[in-house]
Amino acid sequence: MLGEEAMPAGERSSATGDRLYLRNVIYFGALHALPLGALITGASRGAFVAAAVLYVVRIWFVTCGYHSYFSHRAFKTSRWFQLVLAIGAQTSSQGSVLGWAATHRYHHVHADAPSDLHSPHHRGLWYAHIGWLLRTEYLARSQPRTGPFAAFPELVWLDRHPYVPPVCLATALALGLGWPGLFIGYGLSTLAVYHATFAVNSLAHRFGARPYATPDGSRNNWLVALIMLGGGWHNNHHRFPRSARHGLRWWELDVSYGVLVVLGWLALVSEIRVPRPESLSEHAVRRTPERSHRPC
């Protein structure tokens, strides 16, 4: 997912070669150090509650905003709620929705091939998890912001100013809860959201079940599904990339999809895509495998 496909620097670059990307090294180093500030200032119950709530809420925006909606158009919504999805997703500090979606579509085209930006099968788990964001190679492969969403001025503005939502969130937490709000409420929860998202790229392409014979190494990983509110049923996703539902069996918990269903009842979203029941047969899929890594 970017994380799976996140582009926190929000840049477009024609850089060539592959070298250490100091900007992201400094950024991720500072982010990992941020929660440690609470050792000096102390923490508070309110800050930990805020961190827990913001983790769950922002994971949902990553899974259903960045991923299902902007990357795969797995459901439809109004323009104003589309903006809510964009702002909510970008509070996670994973870059603009246009950039995230472009990078994710690149991943689906090249999934687990040598040209994939974050395949654990070629450069190891560390590189797939976060290492790819610390090198300049991914900037050279940055994809153009194209497609229907690039026609919305508000999304283009957020693409040019990707850090406005997270900075506003961090500021609000600092003003409302003091330093613990910044260090724990924002810093710890943002770090947790990053690593949960990154786990889709690393763990869910290496460990778990493969009910579908997709032409990549995607796996259904129950642990990643748990921390990503359903986003870890990744082999299912690579088989049915345009489906908003990733948990396809009764025991595959998919909280993100459940929230979408409720939003559908409230008429905030519509035309939620799910696989046809007859297409779920493992035997049928193995006989006629689909190039599920196509961009959707």
Image (tube, rainbow, N blue to C red):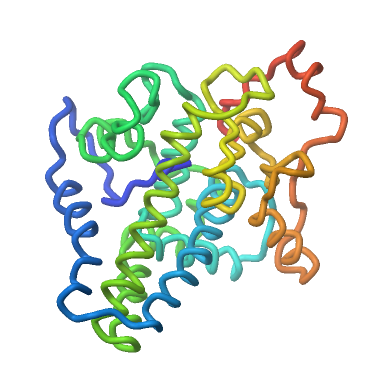
Q: Quadrant of the C terminus?
A: top right
- Residue at 47% x, 39% y: name it: 200
- Residue at 68% x, 47% y: name it: 244
- Residue at 37% x, 30% y: name it: 118
Q: Left or right: 121 with respect to 17?
A: right
- When the figure is inspected, residue 131 is found, relative to residue 167, above or below; the finding is above
- Residue at 33% x, 36% y: name it: 142
Residue farthest bottom in this picture = 176
Residue farthest right in this picture = 278
Pick the residue in front: 47 or 258: 47
Provide residue 65's location: percent of width, then percent of height: 55, 56
- When the figure is inspected, residue 210 is found, relative to residue 200, above or below; the finding is above
Q: Left or right: 115 with respect to 149?
A: left
Q: Quadrant of residue 265?
A: bottom right
Residue 172 at least partly seen:
no
Number of marks:
0
Pick the residue in front: 29 or 110: 29
Provide residue 70's location: percent of width, then percent of height: 54, 50
Q: Quadrant of residue 181?
A: bottom left
Residue farthest top in this picture = 287
Provide residue 133's location: percent of width, then percent of height: 27, 40
Residue 182 at least partly seen:
yes
Q: Left or right: 242 with respect to 142?
A: right
Provide residue 32's location: percent of width, then percent of height: 23, 57
